[in-house]
């Protein structure tokens, strides 16, 4: 790995992890042409600088009968934007929260154990959270592409400093 950022081998390691985060260092080494020790060191460096933030199993909720993946779009009253944002971030049903374009708009991805819980959550958020101007939600019925499954990427910037 060079100090300017990721090299081609690092990018290959990330692609392999993205496809299967359970690969061993030896398996990654075989596919990249480097030793398992080199793979381990490179991955440790990418973890240390935040390029790799963790490893996880990605379960497609549309394939599991118990659960509902959903998208939630919220428009907040400007003076209560932070409170609405905090309510979403604190909910155990919400997995990701984004500020999006438009005045005081928030987009969230979530997972609910069932449709009833989703309805209770969304209606409760609208009625009980001060400052929610408008809310809409959509249930995911199929997932066709998920580029970020398996490995979280920091795409917007190269790491400032990568150690060897």
Image (cartoon, helix red, strand yellow):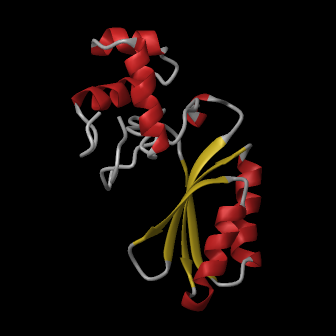
Residue 143 appears in the figure:
no
User: Which quadrant of the view contains residue 18?
Assistant: top left
The residue that appears at 72% across and 77% down in the rendered structure is 129
Q: Which of 119 and 147 is in front in this view?
A: 147
Q: Which of 155 and 63 is in front in this view?
A: 155
Residue 67 appears in the figure:
yes
Q: In this view, does 14 lie to the left or right of 94?
A: left
Q: In this view, does 118 lie above or below 47?
A: below
Residue 3: % across, % down: 27, 43
Which residue is farthest bottom? 79
Residue 161: % across, % down: 34, 49
The residue that appears at 43% across and 36% down in the rendered structure is 45
Q: Looking at the figure, which quarter contains the C terminus?
A: top left
Residue 119: % across, % down: 72, 58
Q: Looking at the figure, which quarter contains the N terminus?
A: top left
User: Which quadrant of the view contains residue 118?
Assistant: bottom right
Q: In this view, does 58 lie above or below 23?
A: below
The residue that appears at 31% across and 30% down in the rendered structure is 10
Q: Nearer the viewer, residue 4 or 97?
A: 4
């Amino acid at each position: 790995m060079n100090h300017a950022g990721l090299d081609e081998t690092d990018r290959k390691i990330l692609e392999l992890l993205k496809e299967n985060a359970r690969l061993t260092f030896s398996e990654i080494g075989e596919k990249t042409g480097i030793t398992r020790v080199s793979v381990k060191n490179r991955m440790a460096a990418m973890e240390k600088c935040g390029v790799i933030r963790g490893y996880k199993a990605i379960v497609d909720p549309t394939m599991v009968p118990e659960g509902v993946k959903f998208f939630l779009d919220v428009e907040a009253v400007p003076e209560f934007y932070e409170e609405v944002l905090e309510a979403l971030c604190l909910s155990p049903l919400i997995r990701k929260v984004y500020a999006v374009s438009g005045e005081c708009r928030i987009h969230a991805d979530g997972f609910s154990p069932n449709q009833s819980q989703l309805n209770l959550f969304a209606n409760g958020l609208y009625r009980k959270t001060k400052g929610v101007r408008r809310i809409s939600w959509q249930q995911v019925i199929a997932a066709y592409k998920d580029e970020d499954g398996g490995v979280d990427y920091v795409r917007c910037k190269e790491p400032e400093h990568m150690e060897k």
